[in-house]
Image: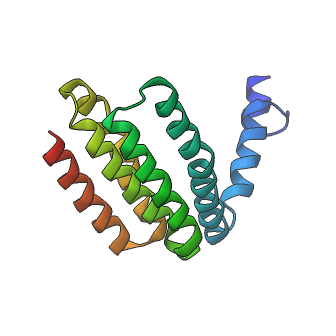
Amino acid sequence: MWLARKQGTAPGPASTIDALIGQWIQDIDAARDRTLKLIRLGHMVMGPAVVLGLFAFVPGSSLTLAALVYLIGLVVVLGLVPHRIQAAALSMLDVLLIGYAGASDPRVWIALLVPVTAAMSIGWLVGRRATWVLYATGLGSMAVAG
């Protein structure tokens, strides 16, 4: 059975996933557009949820104010910024909010290094300039927070 799956003669979970990935990346530009749409959708879903969660669980915190500013930035970016660079602008908001939150406690700062790196890496979907701007902003915000 394993050999049949490896040769592609027997359908299985691996071949199904391989087929899905093959369809996803068949057209690189279409794959990039789909990924950017997923990033925008993720921000639209998670942004308000995080802000409401902060209002519910840590009201009056400086993080609540930062999350509210983030939510306003999210609305502005999604409403005014061209689709092509929305992911980079949203990542910039992520990096700045993560840097601000990381300044509250050294343990938080260490925990947030991975998300800020993930947010900085989104620039490659948009272009070289966006990548370098995100890297500079991420390094700067995490250095200040650290």
Q: Judge whether 41 appears above or below 76 on screen.
A: above
State which quarter of the image contains the N terminus: top right
Which of 2/138 is in front? 138
Q: Judge whether 127 appears above or below 3 on screen.
A: below
Is residue 27 rendered to the left or right of residue 139? right
Is residue 52 rendered to the left or right of residue 12? left
**Residue 71: image x %, image y %?**
49, 52
Is residue 32 rendered to the left or right of residue 126? right
Figure disc tally: 0
**Residue 63: image x %, image y %?**
35, 37
At horizontal 56% and vertical 50% (from top left) the residue drawn is 43
Which of 73/13 is in front? 73
At horizontal 34% and vertical 65% (from top left) the residue drawn is 131
At horizontal 30% and vertical 38% (from top left) the residue drawn is 101
Instruction: Point out the residue furthest to the front here.
Output: 60
State which quarter of the image contains the C terminus: top left
Task: Find residue 9 and report its image quarter.
Answer: top right
Which of 112/65 is in front? 65
**Residue 75: image x %, image y %?**
55, 61
**Residue 124: image x %, image y %?**
42, 64
Q: Judge whether 114 appears above or below 107 on screen.
A: below
At horizontal 81% and vertical 30% (from top left) the residue drawn is 12
Task: Find residue 58 and report its image quarter.
Answer: top left
Q: Judge whether 69 appears above or below 15 on screen.
A: below
Q: How is the image coloured?
A: rainbow
